[in-house]
Image: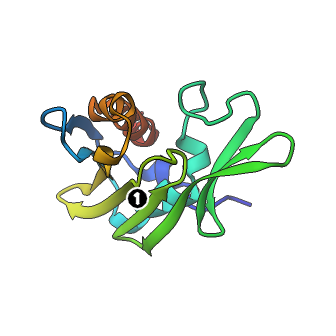
Amino acid sequence: MAGPGAGVLDRATGLVQGPRRAHAQGPHVNAVQASVTVPVDPATAFQIFTDEIDRWYVRGRYSWIDPARAVGIRFEDGCLRELWSDGGHVDTGKIVAWEPPHRLVWADLINKTGRMEIEVAFSPVDGGTEVVLEHRGLDTLPSDVADRIRRGLSWNIALRWYADQWKA
């Protein structure tokens, strides 16, 4: 039996735009944004981002909390959860808004010194959906951590993984 969204990627024939460079100005900016346009409607874009995150989110030493044990990632029980090979897990985010197909927001649970939120919004545009990710609360982090996030590379890379599903 096919999983959620099966066939959607096969039917998406338009070109994917982006991801576009993350927006942040100066060393004291509180938020960074990255965006991408995908060739499906907002409901499908939301569903694939959330229900199929384990399909598109790439495993690696920089993208996981515990890369030696990580075997999956999913939104479940009100959290964004990294699953481990020993049956354990770590909750990396707590869902604070779940509004399909328009937006979701999670509070970061990893950086204990900070109070951050990540919001992902899905808006219809000609030819598909613009997905805008905003990472807020950078001013609550140690400067080296905040500066790394402000460079925007991690979110641009993650949105590229997401968008690459629609490339032929």
Q: Is residue 168 above or below residue 119?
A: above
Place residue 4 in its image quadrant. Answer: bottom right
Could you tell me which quadrant the C terminus lies in? Answer: top left
Residue under pointer 1? 45
Left or right: 2 as drawn, with respect to 30: right
Left or right: 20 as drawn, with respect to 8: left
Q: How many marks?
A: 1
Given residues 72 and 52, the one toward you in this image is 72
Given residues 55 and 113, the one toward you in this image is 113
Left or right: 23 as drawn, with respect to 75: left
Q: Residue furthest top?
A: 61
Q: Is residue 131 above or below residue 46?
A: above
Q: Residue furthest right?
A: 86
- Where is residue 118? Give x, y as percent: 38, 54
- Where is residue 11? Give x, y as percent: 44, 52
Could you tell me which quadrant the N terminus lies in? Answer: bottom right
- At a point 31% along the width and 45% down the height, the residue shown is 138
- At a point 31% along the width and 61% down the height, the residue shown is 121
Given residues 71 and 14, the one toward you in this image is 71
Left or right: 168 as drawn, with respect to 82: left
- Where is residue 130? Give x, y as percent: 25, 54
Amino acid on which disc 1 is placed: Ala
- Where is residue 25? Give x, y as percent: 12, 36
Place residue 141 in its image quadrant. Answer: top left
- At a point 41% along the width and 63% down the height, the residue shown is 105
Dot 1 falls on a residue whose secondary structure is: helix
Mark 1 is surrounded, within 10 Å at the Cα level, by few (under 14), some (14 to 19) or many (20 or more) other residues, namely: many
Q: Colour scheme of this structure image?
A: rainbow
Given residues 25 and 87, the one toward you in this image is 25
